[in-house]
Image (spheres, coloured by chain):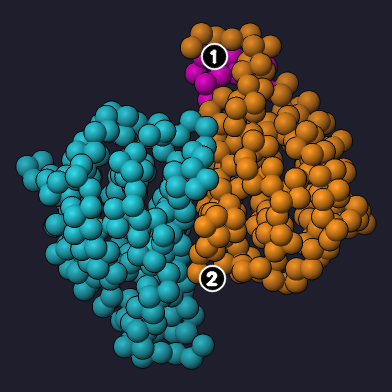
Chain colours: A orange, B cyan
Amino acid sequence: MNLMSPEALEAALRAIGEERYHILHPFHHMLHGGKLTKGQVQAWALNRYYYQASIPAKDASLIARLPTPELRREWRRRLEDHDGDGVHPGGVERWLALTDGLGLDRDYVVSLKGLLPGTRFAVDAYVQFVRERSLLEAIASSLTEMFSPNIISQRVSGMLRNYDFVTAETLTYFTPRLTQAPQDVAFALSYVKAHADTVEKQEQVLAALRFKCDLLWAQLDALHVAYVEPALPPPGAFRP
Amino acid sequence: MNLMSPEALEAALRAIGEERYHILHPFHHMLHGGKLTKGQVQAWALNRYYYQASIPAKDASLIARLPTPELRREWRRRLEDHDGDGVHPGGVERWLALTDGLGLDRDYVVSLKGLLPGTRFAVDAYVQFVRERSLLEAIASSLTEMFSPNIISQRVSGMLRNYDFVTAETLTYFTPRLTQAPQDVAFALSYVKAHADTVEKQEQVLAALRFKCDLLWAQLDALHVAYVEPALPPPGAFRP
């Protein structure tokens, strides 16, 4: 690999999304295409809760390593987005509005008792990655947000159209993400483009984004094998 | 839960195996029943290599925390079993005899380039668990070896009978495990029975074994979704 210009690096990052983002996964197509039962949608929401609930831990461990007030303030906004301010609900709380709306018991969801092990391993791998790797890699791993407005709009419109058990209120999680994600990306992408100034760092940045795509993909894999085909949830996991 | 006698604790541990050990997974049934293609068996061997190769890291981090020469010597035997002595091949090397025998390029296997992300996350979760949890939980998580002679004998006899591309030499990994595993279990089980002397510790021990069963199961889940149905390996993973 040769050193890329910042613009070429951005193009290479976007190409990873084209190839690997979980919008390409059959479970996503089934989800937004109305092909899932309510129980399967419940399983998705219940498992994805663990991802949502772990994002602030990931972000806080990144903030803990950022060197300046400016950088920490920038990343602190993400904490506020996810944890709320005590008046406006954050993303974690809004995700629970989704699991509520789908008829799942909130205590059960939060207990994580029904979680798929595959979800736990993938999410924990993300938190661990952000803790252990360089700041540059940790920030780069957030860049799947470049691709999220597209998947969110597919999800929201598809789910509203195709499931009578889904309402706009249930999907309240997603609307703020459509403006938050691009704001997050603007910072993270410019940081990555400015700091990945050697071939090695550029390779690390690309690998970090591939890793992140992999762990989103693995979460849908775990749902697919447990609830679609062969539809065999591991012993102990949620059964619709 | 009430405090159990050591014998009742052992029975509870064995009951976890009856419910959760990956001998119950459909991929295992297909593997030993001759229902997989050579490419699917290759995918299994390639992915399982990462598990085998990570076991010494897991064991070494446990040894690093054991307090006495006696305990460390006991656990060091596992390192020798897996890494060999420079003359007799250890388990990692013998696993590569299996991937060789299946026609996989050894450099490719060792590079981990074709690994399923789900395999990586599950195996890394195991190494991390043993690093972070109490000695008692770390030792208890090894107790899936209680159940392994049974799965190994099913695997070896079934694979030899059902696949013309599998020879006894290819399966050389498994034979020593039939004597090593019970020896490992004798120590670990007696340690656990002696040290899990409160309700809380007994619950931790049972949870540790469930966790271990989950991560073995998740590895077969990842193989199933990628190579059996819908047979969609994540971008970048091994394609038969």
Q: Amino acid at mark 1?
A: Thr
Q: Earlier in the sequence, mark 1 or mark 2?
A: 1
Q: Is residue A48 left or right of residue B218?
A: right
Find residue A87 and report its horizontal and vertical position in percent: 93, 57
Q: Amino acid at mark 2?
A: Gly
Let me know if residue B57 is in the magenta part: no
Q: Which mark is nearer the camera, 1 or 2?
A: 2
| Dot 1 alpha-carbon crowd within 10 angstroms: few under 14, some 14 to 19, many 20 or more | few
Q: Secondary structure at mark 1?
A: loop
A91 vs B151: above or below? above
A113 vs A17: above or below? below
Let me know if residue A200 is in the magenta part: yes
Front in this rendered view, residue B47 or B92: B47
A154 vs B80: above or below? above
Alpha carbon of mark 1 to alpha carbon of mark 2: how far?
47 Å
**Residue at x-position 19% and y-position 59%:** B157
Q: Quadrant of the C terminus of chain B?
A: top left
Front in this rendered view, residue A221 or B96: A221
Q: Is residue B105 left or right of residue A128?
A: left
In which quarter of the view is residue B40 placed?
Answer: top left
Magenta region, main secondary structure: helix
Q: Secondary structure at mark 2?
A: loop
Task: Determine the chain carrying the residue at label 2.
Answer: A
**Residue at x-position 75% and y-position 37%:** A151
| Dot 2 alpha-carbon crowd within 10 angstroms: few under 14, some 14 to 19, many 20 or more | some
Find residue B171 and report its horizontal and vertical position in percent: 17, 49
Q: Which residue is mark 2?
A: A236
Q: Which residue is mark 1?
A: A198
Front in this rendered view, residue A133 or B89: B89
**Residue at x-position 61% and y-position 18%:** A12
Which residues fall within the magenta stretch? A191-205
